[in-house]
């Protein structure tokens, strides 16, 4: 069994790789900027879990880089079992200052990257009549309450829409599911101010942000046969939020 996790050099993606590797999957680690972290992760999973790990640089907002990554993967493996669309950027800033270019960049990475990878890899999975696609959206894609992240929220809402069309097209062979996490303890959430963090914590019934392993557990589960009847689902994982 094997898995490609986009944006897995650090943050949640890295922990998803560790979860699959721990369970014996060969892993494909994708990075854009964090080469050293990606190589360290490869060494760690190969020596600790004795699985094969491939590291591929690919900016998922560039179609030609996606095509090269897919070629490299299928040279090494005859099929892919699981694709996790995790890579994402969040360019929070003043609503009035956000430019069209910034808006487009967020869509290109978060939404168009997810679309292209799912389409291209999904079609290859369809040839094998098996496969699994898991998208990482966000509660921001369900309840859009932050004008500063209007581009990010739109990209995450778009992923939910993509999910339904992908699941329809690839049925009955490929399950396609999307998870919508609330706040997770990663570099992305460290960027917010202490005051905002405290405001957000007040709304979470569990009164804390998620650990990456709590989200990775769900992603791993969805990729296994234990989740064989979960398809085209949009799953919220946010500790219980009252707005
Ligand atoms: N953290 C949260 O509170 C939270 C909440 C809800 C949902 N999420 C979602 O959970 C997922 C993981 O978030 P995170 O918090 O782990 O983010 P993060 O700490 O900011 O890490 C982002 C990852 O995405 C990669 N990446 C960014 N742009 C890329 C590109 N163009 N091509 C390939 N890889 C790219 C980065 O790789 P490089 O460093 O190599 O460039 C990095 O590995 C994202 O989809 C995010 O939207 C996060």
Image: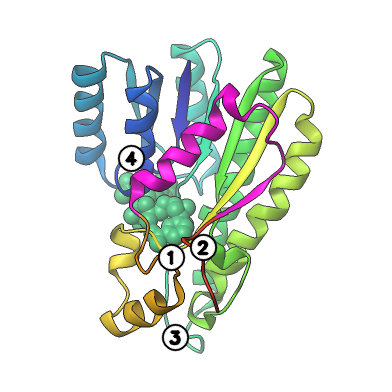
Indicate the secondary structure of the residue bearing disc 1. loop
Residue at x 68% of width, y 13% of height: 128
Residue 230 included in the magenta stretch of the image: yes
Rendered image quadrant of residue 58: top left
Q: Earlier in the sequence, mark 3 or mark 4?
A: 4
169 over 80 or under it: above or below:
below
Q: Is residue 8 visible?
A: no
| Residue that extends furthest to the front in the rendered view of this protein | 205
Please give the residue where the numbered disc 4 appears in the rendered image. Answer: 15
Question: What is the quadrant of the C terminus in the image?
Answer: bottom right
Asked if labels 2 and 1 touch by Cβ distance under 8 angstroms, the answer is yes
Region of the chain picked out in magenta, as a range: 211-236
**Horizontal placement of 117 versus 169: left or right?**
left
Q: Earlier in the sequence, mark 3 or mark 2?
A: 3
Indicate the secondary structure of the residue bearing disc 2. helix
Q: Earlier in the sequence, mark 1 or mark 2?
A: 1
């Amino acid at each position: 069994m094997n898995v490609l996790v986009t944006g897995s050099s650090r943050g949640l993606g890295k922990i998803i790789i560790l979860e699959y590797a721990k369970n014996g999957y060969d892993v494909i680690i994708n990075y854009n900027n964090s080469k050293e972290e990606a190589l360290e992760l490869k060494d760690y999973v190969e020596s600790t879990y004795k699985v094969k790990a491939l590291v591929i640089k690919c900016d998922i907002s560039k179609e030609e880089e996606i095509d090269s990554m897919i070629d490299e993967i299928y040279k090494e493996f005859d099929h892919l079992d699981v694709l996790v669309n995790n890579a994402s950027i969040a360019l929070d800033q003043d609503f009035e200052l956000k430019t069209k270019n910034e808006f487009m960049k967020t869509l290109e990475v978060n939404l168009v990257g997810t679309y292209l990878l799912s389409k291209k890899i999904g079609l290859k999975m369809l040839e094998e009549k098996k496969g699994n696609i898991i998208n990482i959206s966000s509660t921001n894609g369900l309840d859009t309450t932050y004008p500063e992240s209007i581009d990010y929220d739109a990209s995450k809402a778009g992923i939910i829409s993509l999910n339904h069309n992908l699941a329809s097209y690839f049925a009955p062979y490929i399950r396609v599911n999307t998870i919508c996490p609330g706040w997770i303890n990663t570099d992305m959430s460290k960027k917010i101010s202490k005051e905002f963090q405290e405001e957000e914590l007040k709304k979470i019934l569990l009164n804390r942000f998620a650990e990456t392993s709590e989200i990775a557990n769900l992603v791993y589960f969805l990729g296994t046969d234990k989740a064989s009847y979960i398809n085209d689902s949009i799953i919220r994982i946010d500790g219980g939020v009252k707005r």
